[in-house]
Amino acid sequence: MFRQKKIIAIIALFLLLSIMLCIPVSGATVTQNQYGEKVIETNNLSDFLPVEYEGNLQYTTDYAKYFEGDMEQPMLVKTFWGSYYGEYGVFLNKDIIDVEYEMMYHFEMPLTACYWLSAKSGEVNDFNPSYISMHFLNANGTEIHWVTVDEKNASLTVGNNPLNLGTALYLKRFNFDFYVSGELLNEVSTIVIRAENSNKGYNCRFYLGLKKDDVFRITVGDFETDAIIDNQNKNAQSIIDHQTELQENEKAEANQTGADGVGEINSLIPNDTEGLTKAFSNLTKSMIHNNTTCKMNFPGVKIPKLNIRGFEFGNVTLLEEKEIDFEYYFTLIPEIYLKLIRALCTIALVVYCFKEMYSLLSFIFTAKGGGGSE
Amino acid sequence: MSDIAKWALLIAGAIALIALIMALPFMDFLDTSELSSAITDVVSVAGNAFGTVRGLLNNLLSPFGRTCLSGLIIYFFTKWIVTAGIKITTWIYHFIFK
């Protein structure tokens, strides 16, 4: 009896293992190419799940008609839309990609399986689809690594719209390599391919489509050393850039905190020079005062209130404070005389300036050098 | 003594003189804010009066003459500052080295 149970248990375990090995977790197939590299291929859209950043991102899966010449071909299309149109992306399960330490990854996407970001016609120029990046997230959804796709590896075309939506359409194809290193990547749970649209709020939609023969392919292996080093350098540079940015931010914050602190200390020290500085500034401004305004306030004359042995008198205003505008009196002078006076005074001033300049120049050219001879 | 050493000594001497003035006993009862306020008042009145006189003179000059006068006043002011600076430096130099 006990032996039968043992046999049944072994068979059950065997079956369980068989199921785990045989039933694919996703639609992806994993093979090995002639170079010994692992090739992961999928044409199953269920491997691409929508990324919900903000708002309610919805998606539908539809069949669309795609014409290849005269032949009508079916195409499966996932359409994402929502209240937030700033970022779009798809999850790729770690089970599909299986990020390995220190490996070269080559991503290859068919054109139709690229990001399609449609916008209303006339607004497409506002859309900046150049920024496509891959973000590696851990189980908590925290970003632990990223790879930016540069323009060399990604191509942008304004393509036909297979869904016939009547809108301008950007197709972004990205076949790119990246090198994975660093122990942090052991924590990778999901990978997000993200396309960013700087034009938030417009009615953009994000499409991911696969034709019948389209295959999304990831090749994993030890590629050429040069390529690995090159990509490693790129990777290191991106990390350095990110760290530099963080340091700059910290520095700016520290400077701001320091400036605030200095400002607080300065405000605590009584400053007796503020009024003085303003007064001197006013004085120097009056030197370059070039208009003809000349008003002056003459103070009033007043006898103060006096109380001598109970007898009160005074508090009498002899002369009110008065503003005199001298400019007015110049307007009373006939125009011809005023012009003449101005011309004569200006000539006298210019002559004086020349005389002063002459004395200065004659001093400069005749003065003997001082010092140096002791 | 080299020129650089002399200038360094001169600057140090100038700072020391200022510190000496600040350390004098009358600084204890001298209200610097009142002094500053008094100077401010005088400078303000002088500035306003100067502006009025400038306006008055401007009425007697053509626009070109007004600009000329501004240049001339700035020249005199600079000349006065430079002359005063040289006098102060000479005095400190004399005080320290002679």
Image (cartoon, coloured by chain):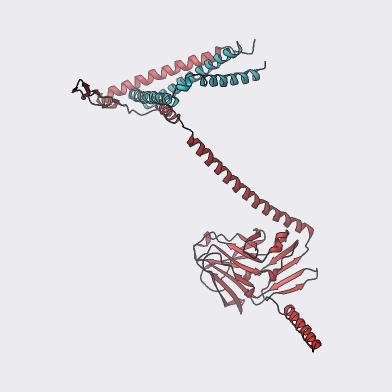
Q: Quadrant of the N terminus of chain A?
A: bottom right
Occupied quadrant, residue B51: top left
Occupied quadrant, residue A156: bottom right
The extreme front residue here reads A309
Which of A81 and A357 lies nearest the eye of the viewer? A81
- Chain A rendering hue: red
Q: Position of residue A153 (x, y in %)?
A: 67, 61
Q: How many marks?
A: 0
Q: Which chain is cyan?
A: B
In the displayed structure, A345 sits above or below A130; it is: above
In the displayed structure, A13 sits above or below A171; it is: below
Horizontal side of A131 relative to B64 (left or right) equals right
Q: Position of residue A190 (x, y in %)?
A: 65, 66
In the displayed structure, A268 sits above or below A21; it is: above
Q: Is residue A142 visible?
A: yes
Q: Quadrant of the C terminus of chain A?
A: top right
Which of A165 and A208 lies nearest the eye of the viewer? A208
Which of A362 and B70 lies nearest the eye of the viewer? B70
Horizontal side of A342 relative to B5 (left or right) equals left
Q: Position of residue A97 (x, y in %)?
A: 70, 68
| Residue at horizontal 54 percent and vertical 62 percent from the top | A86
Occupied quadrant, residue A155: bottom right
Which of A218 and B6 lies nearest the eye of the viewer? B6
Q: Position of residue A318 (x, y in %)?
A: 21, 23
| Residue at horizontal 53 percent and vertical 38 percent from the top | A262
In the displayed structure, A259 sits above or below A177; it is: above
Q: Is residue A146 visible?
A: no
